Structures are given as structure tokens and as C-alpha cells.
Amino acid sequence: MEFLNYLAPVVGVAALVFAYTKVSFIKSVEPGTERMKEISGYIEDGAMAFLSREYKVIGIFMAVMFGVLLAIGRGSIAMPLTFLFGAVFSLLAGYVGMSVATKANVRTTNMAMIGGMGKALDIAFSGGAVMGMTVVGLGIIGISLSYFLSGGDTSIVYGFSLGASSIALFSRVGGGIYTKAADVGADLVGKVEAGIPEDDPRNPAVIADNVGDNVGDVAGMGADLFESYVGALLSGITLGILAYGGIGVTYVLIVAASGVLASILGTQAVKGDKDPQKALNMGTYAASGITLIVAAIFSLILLKSLRPFISAASGVIVGLAISKLTEIYTSADYDAVKKIAHDSQTGASTNIISGLAVGMMSTVGPIIVIAIGIIIAYAGGGGNTTSTHGLYGIAIAAVGMLSTAGMTIAVDAYGPIADNAGGIAEMCDLPENVREITDSLDAVGNTTAAVGKGFAIGSAALTALALFSSYTQAVELSGIDLTRPTVIVGIFIGGV
């Protein structure tokens, strides 16, 4: 059955081909008036300028790390090469996603003007789908090829994960700082000092604000989830070898590949002229449902048990639950946001207090869901009889949660495209009905951005636990002594 392993890179290539078809579709759409093209060009130039500057710094870091890994490995070039492999794939995914997003924004605006809500949603989501499919396509190709070419030596494959993690640090932190600096700066000079509306063309910082949306929520989020996706696959492969041998690896790759195919099919379910949020949710639910069916079938075929499927299902359900809980606390359709709006009538102070209170409450549900998911994954995987099987269950849960990352990233990257579309409509002084459509898309985009962040944090928690579990099994670590000062100091530093 190990021949099924080779389906993973094939599915990865299919995801990249699908992304290419979406790029072609977006480019075939008319970008609109000359003024719209001009504004969009400024945003694209700014985004590419940021990437160029960031990638130069990252290039220096990569060269230094390559030398360090080469020295540590006493001349062995295998891990340094996989490190570069992982870093380059992450950078490539970010570049492709950002490049397409800055082309989709103006076309979304134009479709809102001449085609209505449904066509505008189609363009914006197609732009997001390019990022999503590029991330999972490159991720599954990179991990599977690294595993095959290394002869199954996971210590070499960890270099790929290290490369992905390094780029995620630069993209997430660097991009996030730029995003918020541009956002707050534009609001201070526009709304506070000059007293002009958001996205007003008289405010030059508006362009930087729109650039920041792409930097943080397209390239940054993509690199973040690329890291988690790769880490989940790697931990699953490592623990799969220890728990079931080669067949355990096959199941991990099958679940991941089924998630990629399900995400491709799920994107086709995103249609709708009236409720963008419902359309996006339908795509996510469809992708998750298909993944669960395939995971159950191959759990019985490969491992002769439904235990691994229970673990995978717990991960998928945790991901859906976190997404729904985040939507409840960030969507204008629910009471949490309405309460903040109501409390804001008495001034900025009550707005801050109410918003902070809702934000703190919103963390309770996801934490409980993740905790329950971990317990179910461990017990379902067989942790009550063999700890290695239980830890493999946790890794499978992480893979299950991230199996539909292509769809999740697509929904998240849709947000900044819709936001940019609204900004372009405002700066070009387009008719009010156009702005109403882009505002509706943007409102949903704000929720999807929050959902993406919640999903990224939740998946990172599961992936970190899975990676730590694979480490403890690989080095045969029996336990952690909390009475040792060095352990306590490490916990404190990590908490800070």
C-alpha cells in the first residue's frame, strides 16, 4: 500500500495547476477604469516593494543559517539543502499569493460595478484560492519529496520544517508590524487630525494601509499556516513510523492529500449573490465533509481500525468549531459585535472596555475545544493502551485540522482583497451601490480574517504539541521534571 504515498505529490501538483487556472481566470477579467488601474498599481507597487526589501533581509539570514547547519552537520549538506528547500517554497507561496491578490482587488471592484455581488465575490475568493492552493500544494510536495529523497530519514526532513518556520517568523512578525503601523498611521492623520473619512484619496497613507492588508493577511498568514501545515505533516510522519511503520506514514499523506482535493472541490461550492458569509461557510463545510469520508475509508483499509479516523475527525471538528466561535464573536450578525456597537454610543472609553471584555471572553471557547480535541485524539488513537499510538492520534488530529488549510487560507486571503476593493471604490469615487457591495464583502472579510487568525493559533497549538510529542518519542524522553529550575525558567521565558 505504500505506493499510495506517491499520490501526495501528484495531488500537490494538481493544487498548483488549479491555482494557475484561477490566476488565468482573474487576469481575463477587465480591471476597470484608468483611475482604478492607477490606484491598484500603487497598491501593487507598494506590496512588491515590501516583499523585495523583506526578501533581501531573509536572503542574508538564509545564507547564514545554511552555513550554521552545514557546520553543525560536519559537512553533511542534506539538512541545509532541505532548509533552503522549505524556505524557498514558503517565500514562493507568499510571492504568488501577494502578486495575485493585488491583481484581484481592482477586478473585484469592477465586478461590483458591472456584475453585482455574486461576480465580485467570485473574483475576490478566486484570488484567495490561489494563495490557499499554492500553500498546500507546495507544502505537501515539499514534505513528501523531502521524505522520499532522504530515504525516510525524518531528521533530514526536519530541515524543511525549519526553513518554513524561519520564513513564517519574518513574514508574520514583520508583515504584522507593517500592517498595523500603516493602518494606525492612516487613521491618525486622516480621521483624527484631518477629519476625513477612511480610504479618502486625499490621504496618501491610505495606499500604505491597503498594502498592509496584503502584507499581513495574505503573505503573513500564508507563511504562518504553511509552517503549521508542514509541521503537522512532519510530526505525523515521525510518529506514524514509530506507531505503525510505513503504513502510518501512508495514512498521514492520504489524509493530507484528501484534504487538498476536498479544498479544490470546496472552492466550487462558494457561490451566492446575497450572503457572502454563508457561501464561504458552505465551501468550508463541503471540504471538511469530503475529508472526513476519505479519512474513515482509508483508516479501515490501511490500519484496519477506526481509531486513527477518530483522531483525524477530532482535528477537523476542532477546526470547524474554532472557526464558528470566532465568527460568533466577530460577525455583525451576532450579539457580541452588536453589544460593542451599542456600548460605543457613550464614547471611546466604553468601546474599549466592551471590546476588550468580548475579546477576552472569545478565548474561552477555543481553548476548551482544543483541550477536548486533544483528549479525544489521544484516547481515540489508542493512548489508553499504548502512548505512542495516542501521540500519533494527536499528530493525526493536527493533520486533520490542517488538511483543509487550502480552503481556510482561501477564505482568509479573500478578506484583504475585499478590503482593497472597497478602498479602490472609495478612492475612485464610484457610485454608492458599488460601495454598498464592497462594504458587504469587506464586512465578511473582517470576520474571515479573524477566523483565519483563530484557526492559525489553534492549529499551531496542536502542531506544537504533535512536534513536541514526536521529539520526546524520537529521543526516548520519559518525562519532564517540573522540580528542576531550568525547566521552570524555560516555562516562564516561553510564557513571556
Image: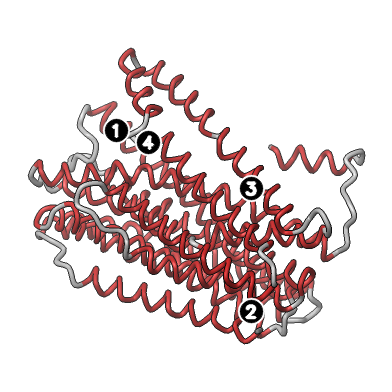
Label 4, on which residue?
184
Disc with the residue nearer the chain's start (2 vs 4):
2
> Looking at the picture, does residue 264 appear above or below residue 108?
below
- Give the quadrant of residue 107: bottom left
Q: Could you tell me the amino acid type at mark 4?
A: Val
Label 2, on which residue?
146
Looking at the image, is mark 3 or mark 1 nearer the viewer? 3
Q: Could you tell me the amino acid type at mark 1?
A: Val
Disc with the residue nearer the chain's start (4 vs 3):
4
Tell which of 314 and 102 is nearer to you.
314
Image marks 2 and 4: residues in contact by CB distance under 8 Å:
no
Image marks 4 and 3: residues in contact by CB distance under 8 Å:
no
Tell which of 66 and 376 is nearer to you.
376
Secondary structure beneath label 1: helix
Label 3, on which residue?
373
Could you tell me how far apart the alpha carbons at marks 2 and 3 are, in whole angstroms?
30 Å
Q: In this rendering, would 320 be left or right of 273?
A: right
Could you tell me how far apart the alpha carbons at marks 1 and 4 are, in whole angstroms?
9 Å
Q: In this rendering, would 218 be left or right of 110?
A: right
Tell which of 33 and 104 is nearer to you.
104
> Looking at the picture, does residue 345 appear above or below residue 296?
above
> 10 Å neighbourhood of mark 3: few (<14), some, or many (≥20)?
many
Image marks 1 and 2: residues in contact by CB distance under 8 Å:
no
Label 1, on which residue?
189
Q: Residue at x 83, y 60 (%)?
A: 386
Secondary structure beneath label 4: helix
- Give the quadrant of residue 49: bottom left
Disc with the residue nearer the chain's start (1 vs 4):
4
Q: Could you tell me the amino acid type at mark 3?
A: Gly
Disc with the residue nearer the chain's start (1 vs 2):
2
